[in-house]
Image (cartoon, rainbow, N blue to C red):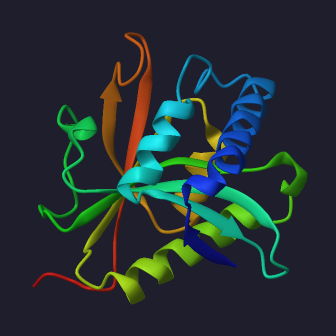
Amino acid sequence: MKIRKATMADLDVVVDILRDGRNQLAERGVDQWQGDYPNVTHVKEDIENGYAYLVKADDGQTVGTLAIVEAPDHFYDKLNGEWLINTENYVVIHRVAIHSRHAGKGYASKLFLSLIEYLETERPEITSIRLSTNENNMAMQRIATKSGFKKVGTLHGAFRPSELSYVYELLTKVRVA
């Protein structure tokens, strides 16, 4: 599995995968992404900033998308918890989705393994990978935990006043002594 930066030529593909992800969450009764987030404007900004990525299976098929957002990410300024490491050398993973056509094939787990390997190889200065997910998104919580992320806190009202998100962090192989 490989990840590559998305370009404006990929806009429709990224938007389609995220809309499909929104539908999958709704089918599971998860109230995440059920409003106007993420939308085309978010995806365009991700692409323009170099944050948007496509996930390709070994056979070359595009199976998913994610955003790797550079620090600082002020989304986490009101974290109720404590980071594993106090660093400016982190990235945050947002807007992760595997298209339903490719569900059940282990691609989400492979995505995280590829992501970690990519960051450790291509971005050795990164010491921390952070992410958050809705309290009811059990699938993402399992994948984060399975991938070695530790739950470090919560965020209240991240997108809507009553919403609770769980926050996770993974320290990369580059350790600070």
Q: Residue at x 53, y 57 (%)?
A: 144
Q: Residue at x 71, y 31 (%)?
A: 25
Q: Quadrant of the C terminus?
A: bottom left
Q: Is residue 173 above or below residue 116?
A: below
Instruction: State the count of labels.
Output: 0
Residue 69, by quadrant, is bottom left
The answer to whether residue 110 of the structure is visible from this angle is yes
The picture places residue 91, in percent across and down from the top left corner, at 31, 61
| In the image: residue 72, left or right of residue 46 | left
Expressed as whole percent of the image width and height from the top left, the position of residue 84 reads 22, 61
In-front residue for pair 64/90? 64
Residue 76: image quadrant is top left
Residue 152: x, y in percent? 31, 49
Residue ranking furthest to the front = 9
Q: Point out the residue furthest to the top here.
A: 161
The image shows residue 34 at horizontal and vertical percentages of 62, 19
Q: Nearer the viewer, residue 143 or 116?
A: 116
In screen coordinates, is 18 left or right of 42? right
Residue visible at 29% across and 85% down in the picture: 124
Q: Quadrant of residue 122?
A: bottom left
